Amino acid sequence: MSESIGIVITGASGRMGQMLVKTVTERDGVHVAGVVERPGHDWVGRDLGVLMGGTESGVIVSDDPAAAFAGAQAVIDFTAPSATISFAKTAAAAGVAHIIGTTGFTEEDLVALAEAGQGGVTIRAGNMSLGVNLLVQLTKRVAAALDEDYDIEVIEAHHRRKVDAPSGTALMLGEAAAEGRGVALKDVEDRARDGITGARERGAIGFSVIRGGDIVGEHDVMFAADGERIILRHVASDRGVFARGAVKAALWAQGKDAGDYDMLDVLGL
Ligand SMILES: NC(=O)c1ccc[n+]([C@@H]2O[C@H](COP(=O)([O-])OP(=O)(O)OC[C@H]3O[C@@H](n4cnc5c(N)ncnc54)[C@H](O)[C@@H]3O)[C@@H](O)[C@H]2O)c1
Ligand SMILES: O=C(O)C1=N[C@H](C(=O)O)CCC1
């Protein structure tokens, strides 16, 4: 019989952290090997089971990532860019696969992240759901099939507490559309429109952002031409889809060579 895989969850008190604790606890073949919160957080030093509204679990929330990662097989990390860069170094040093769901990285952050994670197994995706990763592939195909008579617009909506924009998913979809067209996203992206913008530039890939209420995550990729529109859409109504994808990634990572992977690798898409 195969051994249960020990998973550490960082940012355990967060929206995704709590969903991950629940998902890992309920799934066969994996267990919560540790949880981490930021120093000074009121969860630190307390029992996770009690904090989650149940009975004592014996898992105490730590603010010491190196101690928490030691002996685990994977870290699932949905926190913030600076925290994730620091966890990457600790995970690589501990020989623990680092599954990164965090979004909002700048170009400089991504360079720092790659450096920090060197020598380790890293899987990063702005969206860990099967549906969105399938949508990424569909977007690439549709963009490759259509010419620039079809204006590409990515529209996303999330809850009022989200701190980064456009979403990591919107950027994945924009990258996929640009790749399908054979251009670099940074050369064609249009991320801010306000005032007298002038007419739309042919070939641009536009982004629109909605923030409100408790929207879990909604993404449209629109191909708009004279006389018709094609709209590819994904709607997430439960954060469980992201958590289940992350656990799948943690399992897939076991025994893989050091390197940077994404959910397309994990899902074989
Ligand atoms: N890739 C995906 O599928 C996916 C899905 C949902 C959310 N996200 C991303 O995950 C991230 C978290 O989202 P959320 O809604 O859970 O946010 P949240 O604010 O509810 O949770 C973030 C948690 O990280 C903790 N944290 C911050 N710095 C830390 C540190 N140094 N050490 C330990 N913990 C630290 C915070 O205390 C908080 O509990 C965001 O970047 C979001 O965009 C990605
Ligand atoms: O709630 C969030 O924050 C989400 N972030 C990811 C993104 O930025 O695309 C995935 C969807 C939910």
Image (tube, rainbow, N blue to C red):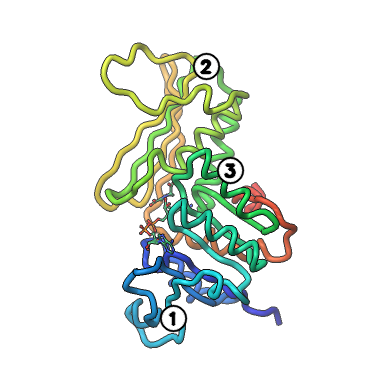
Q: Residue 13 placed where, x, y %?
A: 37, 68
Q: Amino acid at mark 1?
A: Ile
Left or right: residue 60 versus residue 115 is: left
Regarding mark 1 in the picture, which secondary structure is present there?
Answer: loop
Mark 1 → mark 3, Cα distance in angstroms: 33 Å
Q: Which of the 4 quarters of the picture holds residue 147?
A: top right
Q: Are marks 1 and 2 in contact (CB under 8 Å)?
A: no
Closest to the observer: 228 or 63?
63
Kindly identify the amino acid type of the residue bearing the numbered disc 2.
Glu
User: Horizontal and vertical percent for residue 227?
Assistant: 41, 16
Quadrant (top left, top right, bottom left, bottom right) of the N terminus: bottom right
Who is closer to the viewer here, 60 or 108?
Answer: 108
**Quadrant of the rendered image containing residue 257:** bottom right
Residue position marked by numbered label 2 in the rendering? 148
Q: Which mark is residue 20?
A: none
Residue drawn at x 63%, y 53% is: 267
How far separated are the C-alphas under marks 3 and 2? 32 Å
Which residue position is annotated with label 3?
A: 111
Foreground label between 1 and 2: 1
Which residue lies most toward the top here? 198
In space, the residues marked 1 and 2 are separated at their CA atoms by 55 Å
Q: Is residue 213 left or right of residue 47?
A: left
Characterize the local packing of mark 3: few (<14), some (14-19) or many (20 or more) Cα atoms within 10 angstroms.
Answer: few
Query: Compared with residue 99, is residue 147 higher up or lower down, i.e. above or below?
Result: above
Task: Provide the residue designation for mark 1.
Answer: 60
Q: Amino acid at mark 3?
A: Val
Residue at 60% across / 67% down in the picture? 74
